[in-house]
Amino acid sequence: MSTINYSEKIPNNVNLGEDRTLQRALEGWQPNFINWWDDVGPEGSTNYDVYLRTAVSVDPNGWAQFGHVKMRDYRWGIFLNPGDANREIHFGDHKGEKAWQDVPGEHRANLRRIIVTQGDTEPASVEQQRHLGLTAPSMYDLRNLFQINVEEGRHLWAMVYLLHKHFGRDGREEAEALLQRTSGDQDNPRILGAFNEKTPDWLAIFMFTYFTDRDGKFQLSALAESAFDPLARTTKFMLTEEAHHMFVGESGVSRVLARTAQVMNDLKTDDPAKVRAAGAIDLGTIQRYLNFHYSVTIDLFGADQSSNAATFYSSGLKGRYEEGKRSDDHILKGQTYKVLEVVNGQLQEKDVPMLNALNEVLRDDFIKDSMAGVGRWNKVLEKAGIPTRLAVPHKAFNRQIGALAGIKMSPDGRVVSEAEWTARKAEWLPTPEDFAFVASLMGRVVEPGKFAGWIAPPVMGINRQPVDFEYVRFG
Ligand SMILES: [Fe+2]
Ligand SMILES: [Fe+2]
């Protein structure tokens, strides 16, 4: 059951061949997906043979097979984690009932909205990253970018399968629309803000995969608890792929820091101008990129108080991160949670019903997880003897969504005047000069084993291959 059938046009482990109607519908969508990939997927990559991993089974161990493939021939498909026929709903008002194999009519609209919103982020990130291959700092990094791109494409397949199988005609229309919205498009943008931002350079993609793919991890983890069993099973499998995306971000930033620290030590300087002149990225710029990507990403969790969040939880559609490991009643009625609000221009905590604060609960879980990795980045600086430390900004910094939108807050958590914000914004968020400087470093370095001057090589290669392995063969 957990082996994937690659003899069919659409690889799958859901016995697609036994459901001719569904198979035909998905085979109708497939050419549109390939057209989308050709139009807005990685630029100029059609003839490349890329050393990619492909899922061959959904068993937790050994599910990946590595080999050189053309990305447009990547075996995108439909892979669900093995099911448990006796699985019970373990939170919300339906707790203790059998998990659903089909969509209950009363939850149809909400479930479709959840699946479409998740599905929309997957192709969006491929679009955002479309041009980065042209400025890769190494062949190793180029390969990692492409790995992420094909897996986000597969995540789109995962959501489209659910739409086609469980939502009839509406589902098929939504699946088409997922290929029509475009990241950053004026008239038909992607659904969520962070997925319409630009990812202009490789410092941005490392921050994006560290922070924004981690949002993916938390959203998918919450959906992996769902009472709708096919959604739970497919998101569980997506999570195994997501881990590599976050690794690319975390190790990417670590390598940038290692190189910057080396330059600072060689020149015995902490002057950003001298660091830049030596072709490395100064720590101030790295911190400003971090501030931007962190603040834009925590907005993705939505409003701090939300009746939708309460409905999604109580009706069993979306759980909390690691719901099964928590020791409360998993119903949460009558419980409270602290959120921030602005009173007379100052931040205050207030207790609100926990069910309404579940976006904030998930955001706080994300923040904890994010900070752990920033601590590991600081270890790189500490080891190199550099006293500067990176930090995530205050939760209320640069927010556009929820009760904190519209207040002006310094990264260290002081409410500031409009005048101070305007005067100091350039210390806190990347400036046009920062972007121009980072862009000036972005040349294409793709000879095996060579690395751009602003980033250190990785400690090891992919799948135990050497760092100078030919990860991409250019056709
Ligand atoms: Fe994804
Ligand atoms: Fe991802």
Image (cartoon, grey):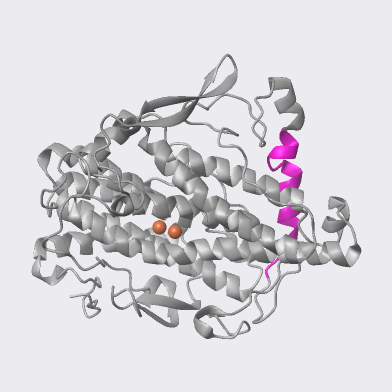
Q: Is residue 202 visible?
A: no
Q: Quadrant of the N terminus?
A: bottom left
Image quadrant of ligand 1 equals bottom left
Q: Is residue 427 in the magenta section?
A: yes
Q: Is residue 110 visible?
A: yes
Q: Residue furthest front?
A: 327
Residues 290 and 37: in front is 290
**Secondary structure mainly formed by the magenta segment:** helix
- Residue depicted at 11% across the width and 44% down the height: 104
Q: Which residues are magenta?
A: 425-444
Residues 41 and 401: in front is 401
Residues 90 and 200: in front is 90
- Residue depicted at 23% across the width and 78% down the height: 3
**Residue 20 image point, x, y percent:** 10, 65
Is 309 left or right of 190, judged from the image as shown? left
**Residue 409 image point, x, y percent:** 64, 29
**Residue 57 image point, x, y percent:** 28, 77
- Residue depicted at 54% across the width and 44% down the height: 197
Give the image quarter of residue 433. top right
